[in-house]
Amino acid sequence: MTLPFAPKTPVYGGDYNPEQWDAGTVDEDIRLMREAGVNLVSLGIFSWARMEPEEGRYELDWLAELIDKLYANGIMVDLATGTASPPAWMAEKHPETLPVTAEGIRFGFGSRQQYCPSSPLYRRKAAELAGELAQRFGAHPGVVLWHIGNEYGCHIHECFCEECAAQFRIWLLEKHGSVDGINKVWGTDFWSQRYGTIDQITPPRAMPTFSNPGQMLDWRRFCNHQILGCLLGEREQIRKYSDRPVTTNFMGAFRWLDYREWARYMDVITDDSYPEPSDPASACEVAWQADLMRGLAGGKPWFLMEQTTSEVQWRTRNASKRPGQYALWSLERLAHGADGVLQFQWRQSIRGSETFHAGMVPHAGKKSATWHEVVELGSTLQKLGPVVGAPQEANVAIVLDWESEWATMSAVGPQDWSHFRLAREWHRTLWEQGITTDIVGTDADLSRYTVVIVPGVLIDYREFAQRASRAVERGTQLLVVTPTGLVTPELEALQGGYLGSLQALLGVSVTDLYGLTAGVYEHDPMGVPRVHTEESDARDNLVNRLSRAVEVPGAAHSMPLAIDRDELERARDRLMAVDSPKVSLRPGLRGQLWGERVAMVQPDVEVFATFAASGGAIDVAGLPALTRRAVGAGAAWYLATDADGFTRAVIWQLLAAYARVHPAFAGLPDGVEAQERGDFLFLLNHSDRVAELAGIMGKDLVSGGEATGHLVLPPRSGAVIDRR
Ligand code: GLA
Ligand code: ZN
């Protein structure tokens, strides 16, 4: 399967914002694009002010000329509807289109994305513009894709204006039926929040303290719905006049918008990804976002809509990519299922807010090292035609659920937590161990996977539990990590023991929450920065006669877990089919932040680890921390704490041993990632050292050389071995 516009080689190019340049520069741009091997550009993302300089007067000839020129030069266009940045006349004539903060401040004009997603005027004008463009260019052979809006929700993911309030009320009544229905679900009988009429309900504006959690959760859903509505309005107009596929650029695991829902309206999934180059785990961020996009695409190819060739300008400190890293991370996206990479932006601005954001053509032009890398990657991609459309198969899945992230954010307590953080950390564990992972929703067919990890899915879903049970029966190893199954989809706490519908399968229930270790936090639970050091505590305790006698296990930095090392070691040895590198158990296992009292509800539950009699969880010492229950051909595991990275790796190895899952390629030097995609083996050297690899046979599509057992990869470089 290939992208709907079936390119023969991976797509390559970038955002092209030609309104910044004179005609001569545009001609030079096209020459340079050809030199760099560019075959796709995103056009018009910020062009509304040029496309419709006055309300109702469209000027599209300049765009027509440009699309023709690009097409004549073999460059396809991802045509943007330009609606991410409404023009000045809209703010002037229709100030009610400007978004309002929770504090009631209406934003001004002069930046971008300054629109209220509920504004009927904005929506109508955006849809009309999309329609104009579709009528004019919808059948142009050079226009292969529609780019609706741009990074929806990036700056404005909620608006608190009167229009949004009115729409929120309508949405609430539709969902809950009546004001009483809303009162019930939100639990407004507490704190005297009961509403008498629908008009009393407002968005969760600035408040003295916590907003009602039910209101917050519905607000999250409503905001997602409103912003999606903007996209759908434009999409409908495009569909009237054009059959070209549509996309909008996602931003990885962007917590404010439920991309799983959005993905249903996309013909192609595209992503923007800007990992921090000064973080040693950035290549993992690349993999995480890519794996998520592959999942959202449902196995169909996706591509990267934006990355930077080097530094961005929007962090406080903007590290440059190291030599080779731009190409390496681009190859990494391909390794994880992408069929191309585009950059923001083609030519680096010389004025405006993004002047110091790198581009494909930097300020120094062809003299720059960046330009050299841009051309080099272009020529590499032209050699990777065979990879286009190749499928990627994973045996392991991590469940990611936007509603649970929202529920976690909306609930006041029980912990300052993020389901997405937990999911990302487990993904990292697998990535570090060389395992390819799918990121799936709670509606996924779990029996396709030998291992499924459920990292803190707060909401209890009956159907998900049923699907999980069937998968385990058929052989899946399912690992459920706390905090899972604490609330219903309407945020009502489960009674009679947490884990709800999963209790029967896991064989355990959670009777008491036992947290939190404070050591990892930089602020205390009241948000006050923690200034205590062990030294200051010791000095103060010379005089603190009363408090120095109080033990506070909850302030300990970790929760050691007691395991029978020999038994665990033997279990692993017995089960490991091949000798993939084993993590030593010496450093011991540890939980952090959170623990629970777990009770057995089935007799056949094995306990792999318990909370130890020291550290943060001493009050639950001896109680289960990691359990396993064999069911049918598989097993259901429960982890009652937030494991640190080392502990996650050990647990993973146990799961892998039972599931007999192996890395794509074992025995690689440190820093080298291997990913299989169809018949192609991607070998990516993320390290600063030359990597020598043994046992590699086949043609390397990147270098053109033939590997006959031995392959040398320079620092920050990659190879794509053709194994057909
Ligand atoms: C986002 C936007 C782009 C650009 C980049 C810069 O991804 O979509 O227009 O501003 O950030 O990193
Ligand atoms: Zn609004």
Image (cartoon, rainbow, N blue to C red):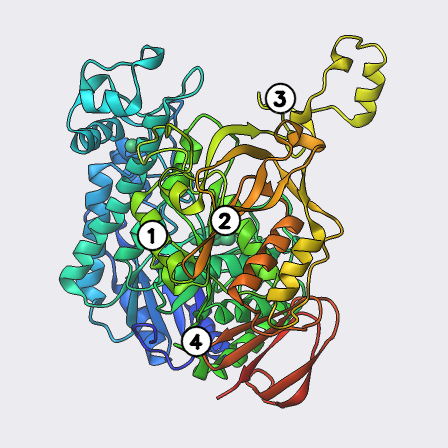
Q: Nearer the viewer, residue 379 or 658?
A: 658
Q: Badge 2 local density, few (<14 within 10 Å), some, or many (20+)?
A: many
Cα–Cα gap, marks 1 and 3? 36 Å
Q: Badge 4 local density, few (<14 within 10 Å), some, or many (20+)?
A: many
**Secondary-structure class at tag 1:** helix
Q: Badge 1 local density, few (<14 within 10 Å), some, or many (20+)?
A: some
Amino acid beneath label 1:
Arg
Residue 423, relative to residue 221: is it above or below?
below
Instruction: Look at 48% across and 45% down and name the residue there.
Output: 420
The residue identified by callout 2 is 423
Report the side of 547 relative to 702 (left or right). Answer: right
Q: Residue 10 carries which label?
A: 4
Q: Do the residues labelled 2 and 4 touch (CB within 8 Å)?
A: no
User: Between disc 4 and disc 3, whose residue precedes?
Assistant: 4
Estimate the x, y position of residue 185 in percent, counting from the top left: 27, 25
Foreground disc of the pair 2, 4: 2
Q: Do the residues labelled 3 and 2 touch (CB within 8 Å)?
A: no
**Secondary-structure class at tag 3:** loop
User: Between disc 3 and disc 2, whose residue precedes?
Assistant: 2
The residue identified by callout 1 is 260
Residue 624, relative to residue 556: is it above or below?
below
User: Between disc 1 and disc 4, whose residue precedes?
Assistant: 4
Q: Is residue 477 visible?
A: no
Cα–Cα gap, marks 3 and 2? 27 Å
Amino acid beneath label 3:
Val
Cα–Cα gap, marks 1 and 4? 25 Å
Cα–Cα gap, marks 1 and 2? 15 Å
